[in-house]
Image (cartoon, rainbow, N blue to C red):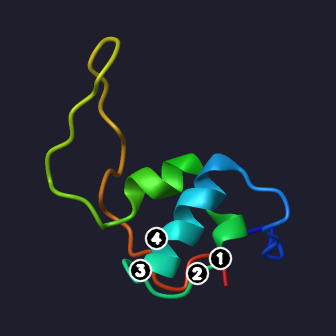
């Protein structure tokens, strides 16, 4: 773990989404600067089925399996 300090002066896409989920109350406190795109896919916050919009169908390993609570702290 890298232990990035939360810094919202510049955002990576997954950092913005994680911060928005936290601000909305959808998930409890986490360090948004530690969240990667695959982490977002693996957070257990979605419905069971997902639909790929483009390209050949691919399985997302670990989809919807991890608790986001306290992520990156």
Label 4 belongs to which residue?
21
Label 3 to label 4, Cα distance in Å?
A: 6 Å
Q: Which mark is residue 30?
A: 2
Label 4 residue SS: helix
Asked if 28 appears above or below 3 in the picture, the reply is: below
- Tell me the CA gap for discs 1 and 2: 6 Å
Few, some or many C-alpha atoms within 10 Å of disc 1 (few <14, some 14-19, many ≥20)? some
Q: Residue at x 54, y 85 (%)?
A: 70
Q: Residue furthest top?
A: 55
Front disc: 4 or 2: 4
Q: Is residue 2 above or below residue 70?
A: above
Which residue has dot 1 on it? Answer: 72
Asked if the residues shown at circle 2 and circle 3 are in contact, with their CB atoms under 8 angstroms apart, the answer is yes
Tell me where residue 60 sits by quadrant.
top left
Mark 2 is surrounded, within 10 Å at the Cα level, by few (under 14), some (14 to 19) or many (20 or more) other residues, namely some
Q: CA distance from mark 2 to mark 3?
A: 8 Å
Which comes before the other along the chain, label 4 or label 1? 4
Residue 48, compared with residue 22, is above or below; it is above
Q: Residue 27: which disc?
A: 3
Q: Secondary structure at mark 3?
A: loop
Q: Secondary structure at mark 1?
A: loop
């Amino acid at each position: 773990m890298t232990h990035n300090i939360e810094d919202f002066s510049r955002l990576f896409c997954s950092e913005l989404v994680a911060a928005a989920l936290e601000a909305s109350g959808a998930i409890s406190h986490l360090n948004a600067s530690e969240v990667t795109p695959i982490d977002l896919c693996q957070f257990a916050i979605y419905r069971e089925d997902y639909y790929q919009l483009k390209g050949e169908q691919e399985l997302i390993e670990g989809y919807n399996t991890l608790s986001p609570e306290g992520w990156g702290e």
